[in-house]
Amino acid sequence: MFLKTGNGKIQNEEIENFFVISVFVEYHGKGFKMKMKKLVALTLSATMLLSMTACGSEKDSKKKAGVDASKVESIYDALKLADDYTTGNYTTEIDMTIEEAGQEVGINATVSGKKDGANGTADAGITVNFDGTKISFDFDDIFTVADGRLYIDADNAIESVTGNDDTEFGSYGLLLPEVDEDKQEEIRTDVMELYIDMLEASLEGVDVEEDDGTFTVKVEEVDEFKSVVDNFVNYLDENKEDVADTMNGMLNGIAENVDYEQYINDLFDDISEDLISAVGVLGGELTEDNLEEVKQEAIDSINVTVDEFDVSEIETLVSEYADLNEDEFEAGFEELDKHSFELEVTATEDKYVISGSFDIEGNGTVIKGTISYTFEVDDVNVEAPDNAKTLTEMAEWGKENTDILDEVVADFQNSMLYSLFAGSLGGGDDVIIYDEDISDDYEDYEE
């Protein structure tokens, strides 16, 4: 049941089984494990979402010297301040280790950068360690959001994948859709309030330690876990309509907060002249009529649907948990050597940290990890990158530097990403990544 299949691909079902069921499958009978599956999945999902909630605020509060944290008296007060930290440096990190049947997988993923109101930058990195085999990708300064555009640094992306730092494509800024910021803030506030209410209800009766602005909750004993889960399920049962309404409000709000037809029109208006010019540089031909046809096809294909959260799903979960008696619950933990969960929140004038960690060990299996978000207030200024270029300028550089592109292609074929992609198709050296019409020895770049 480890992370591999006969064809080398990891299926969604297998991932779910490993991350959720394996915590309990080996420890008790079918009745326990199947009833706990949804409960554990939902609980972990809620915890992770709460831990990551701080990442997405777009309040336009420029150059705050700090945040007023003087009235923070509880962990819940601290959580409510997440959106007030708008200018500074942030780091989001997920670190997880899984051991089973003598094999070990370690996963570390980080996103960090600067935040300047609605503008920001992002570096990204991921490292996977499978029984001593290390796979790592680091994308430095790859994304910048500034003045309504998402800039992607092509040179940093190429260097991160191939190790080749000779390209000078620069960064291209893709027009972002306009959103109703007030509506977006309303959605975030509603969801954040729901998560905090849910957490506060779940932790009723659990000790919260406070030390110089840092609040810590640690749950280790079986009766504590039972109490937290009881409280959580009771909250869902008593507030199922509100929970469903809030979740559906979030899903529908996100879907409805963008006028997709208007965005497609704006995007084509913004890019058309430059794209026609870039294709011309490469010896091709693209007309306004061609683009108009593509634009209309894109508009006609718009189909935004939302799979709404149904109250019956909550009712089913509550009913299944009600059928699980206390003896069955405790039996699920009997063969575990260790089971702990910890939530830590720090909110001061110039720093905000939220971190959730878990450690489950027993029966030859270890699953432990940490999810954290750190924000340090600082006077930062995020603007469009200095190497921003048009598509035409990028095409001109590519046409004039085919020798460097030859090297990039060769470096890519020797890269870890190519090896992984080839392995996922089960083809090794025989794998074809590019269409034959444009890849004959990679000579015909213009086509």
Image (cartoon, rainbow, N blue to C red):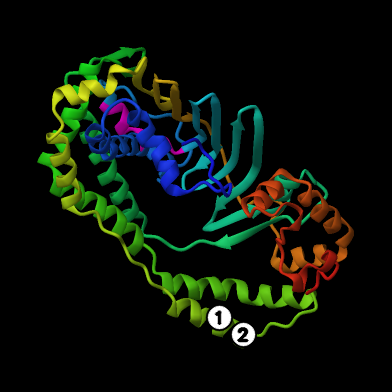
Q: Is residue 350 visible to the viewer in this orientation of the structure?
A: no
> Horizontally, is 331 left or right of 359 in the view?
left
Element class at badge 1 = helix
> Could you tell me which residue is drawn at 71 percent across and 58 percent down?
431
Q: Which residues are magenta?
A: 76-86
Distance between the alpha carbons at the discs numbered 1 and 2? 6 Å
Q: SS class of the residue under badge 2?
A: helix
Residue 312 placement (x, y as % from top left): 16, 51
Any magenta on residue 103? no
Residue 280 falls in image quadrant: bottom right
Q: Position of residue 363 (x, y in %)?
A: 40, 20
Q: Amino acid at mark 1?
A: Val
Name which quarter of the figure residue 76 lies in. Answer: top left
Residue 225 drawn at (x, y percent): 24, 22
Residue farthest to the left? 238
Query: Where 247 sits versus 281, above or below?
Result: above
The crowding category of the residue bearing disc 1, from other C-alpha atoms within 10 Å (few below 14, some 14 to 19, many at least 20), is: few
Residue situated furthest bottom in the rendering: 289
User: Does 83 appear in magenta?
Assistant: yes
Residue tagged 1:
294
Residue 39 visible to the viewer: yes
In the image, is residue 58 above or below residue 129?
A: below
How many residues crowd around disc 2 within 10 Å: few (fewer than 14), some, or many (20 or more)?
A: few
Which amino acid type is shown beneath numbered disc 2? Asn
Point out which mark residue 290 bears: 2
